[in-house]
């Protein structure tokens, strides 16, 4: 997977499965810059063996204002 530069203007539409829009009835849908997207985690036997344990270091992104 190639990394997109931050000045790339490409956008993607994201439909959240577990977040609702302000009316509380529809799934939340928003456009986000493509460079903020992460790939889908791999699946299969190797991924199934890799569980999280307490105090594991993980990759995270916070966009706090």
Image: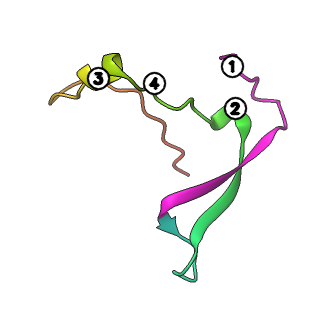
Q: Residues within 10 Å of mark 3 (few under 14, many from 20)?
A: few
Q: Disc 3, disc 4: CB below 8 Å?
A: no
The mark that comes first in sequence, 1 or 4, is 1
Whether tag 4 and tag 2 are in contact, CB under 8 A, the answer is no
The first of marks 4 and 2 along the sequence is 2
Mark 2 neighbour class, 10 Å CA radius: few under 14, some 14 to 19, many 20 or more: some
How far apart are the two marked residues, 1 and 2, measured between alpha carbons?
7 Å
Tell me, yes or no, whether the highlighted magenta stretch contains residue 11: yes
Instruction: Left or right? Give the position of 56 relative to 44.
Output: left
Could you tell me how far apart the alpha carbons at marks 3 and 2 are, in whole angstroms?
23 Å
Residue at the (48%, 36%) spot, across then down: 61
Q: Is residue 2 above or below residue 24?
A: above
Q: Which residue is disc 2 drawn over?
A: 35
What residue would you read off at disc 1? Answer: 3
Tell me if label 3 and label 2 are in contact, CB under 8 Å. no
- Residue displayed at 62% across by 36% down: 37
Color scheme of the displayed model = rainbow
For discs 3 and 4, the disc positioned in front in the rendered view: 4
| Label 1 element class | loop
Magenta residues (range): 1-18
- Residue found at x 56% / y 29%: 39
Report how far apart the C-alphas of labels 1 and 3 lie in the structure: 22 Å
Q: Secondary structure at mark 2?
A: helix
Label pair 1/2, CB-CB below 8 angstroms: yes
Q: Earlier in the sequence, mark 3 or mark 2?
A: 2
Q: To which quarter of the image does residue 6 belong?
A: top right
- Residue indicated by mark 4: 42
Q: Is label 1 or label 4 in front?
A: 4
Disc on res. 57: 3
Against 21, residue 65 (above or below) is above
The numbered mark, 3 or 4, whose residue comes first in the sequence reads 4
């Amino acid at each position: 997977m190639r990394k997109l530069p931050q000045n790339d203007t490409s956008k993607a539409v994201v439909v959240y499965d577990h977040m609702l829009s302000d009316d509380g009835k529809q799934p939340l849908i928003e456009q986000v810059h493509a460079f903020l997207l992460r790939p889908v985690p791999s699946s299969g036997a190797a991924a199934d063996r890799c569980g999280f344990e307490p105090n594991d270091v993980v990759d995270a992104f916070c966009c706090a204002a």
